[in-house]
Each structure stands twice: as C-alpha cells, then as structure tokens.
Image (cartoon, helix red, strand yellow):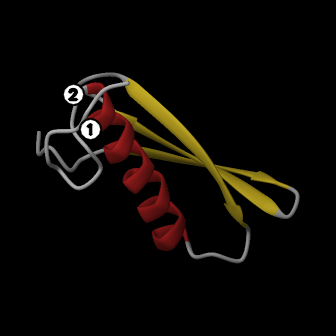
C-alpha cells in the first residue's frame, strides 16, 4: 500500500461536514470540521494534511519534515 493511501469518511452535520482521515498502517485517525460548501476533494485534502501533521508529531518531526523538538 502506498504511504499516501488513507481512508476518508464524510458526515454532514448541519452547515458543516465532519471529515475523518484514517491511516490504515498506524490506525491513527483525525477529524476536521469543514464548511459544507467545500468540495469533497478540498475537504479530504484538509483532513489528510492534518493526519500527516499528527503522524509527523508522533514521529518527533516538525510539520515541515525536519527534526522537531518535543516539549
């Protein structure tokens, strides 16, 4: 499986959509609320960006991919 393959899920909640992204390798899941008028592609990109951030933080990396300082 490619490292950029994630499971994306959408749930409409009024004027917002809860977008969840799951990394099937680490079983890490994140959710982000986005306005309902965003396209699914834009919403999925936001969730994947947050998931990559969380995965990088767990691996001790900064958001830009460089070694980060854990506090």
Q: Position of residue 15 (x, y in %)?
A: 85, 64
Q: Position of residue 6 (x, y in %)?
A: 32, 44
- Which dot marks residue 32? none
Q: Position of residue 28 (x, y in %)?
A: 38, 26
> Residue beneath label 1, please?
56
Horizontally, residue 69 falls left or right of residue 45, namely: left
Q: Residue at x 21, y 27 (%)?
A: 59
Q: Which is more toward the observer, 43 or 69?
A: 69
Horizontally, residue 39 falls left or right of residue 65, namely: right
Compared to residue 58, the image places residue 44 above or below, namely below
Asked where in the image residue 49 lies, by quadrant, the reply is bottom left
Q: Residue at x 38, y 37 (%)?
A: 54
Under tag 2, what secondary structure?
loop
Q: Residues within 10 Å of mark 2 (few under 14, many from 20)?
A: few
| CA gap, disc 1 and disc 2 | 5 Å
Horizontally, residue 64 falls left or right of residue 27, namely: left
Compared to residue 52, the image places residue 28 above or below, namely above
Point out the image quarter for the N terminus.
top left
Q: Residue at x 38, y 24 (%)?
A: 71
Asked where in the image residue 26 lies, by quadrant, the reply is top left
Compared to residue 39, the image places residue 33 above or below, namely above
The residue furthest right is 14
> Residue beneath label 2, please?
59
Horizontally, residue 28 falls left or right of residue 13, namely: left
Q: Residue at x 50, y 37 (%)?
A: 30
Q: Are marks 1 and 2 in contact (CB under 8 Å)?
A: yes
Under tag 1, what secondary structure?
helix
Q: Which is more toward the observer, 64 or 3?
A: 64
């Amino acid at each position: 499986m490619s490292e950029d393959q994630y499971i994306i899920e959408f749930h409409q909640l009024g004027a917002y959509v809860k977008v969840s992204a799951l990394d099937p390798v680490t079983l890490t899941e994140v959710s982000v609320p986005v306005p309902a008028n965003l396209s699914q592609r834009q919403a999925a990109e936001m969730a994947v960006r947050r998931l990559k951030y969380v995965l990088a933080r767990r691996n001790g990396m900064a958001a830009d991919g460089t070694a980060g300082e854990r506090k």
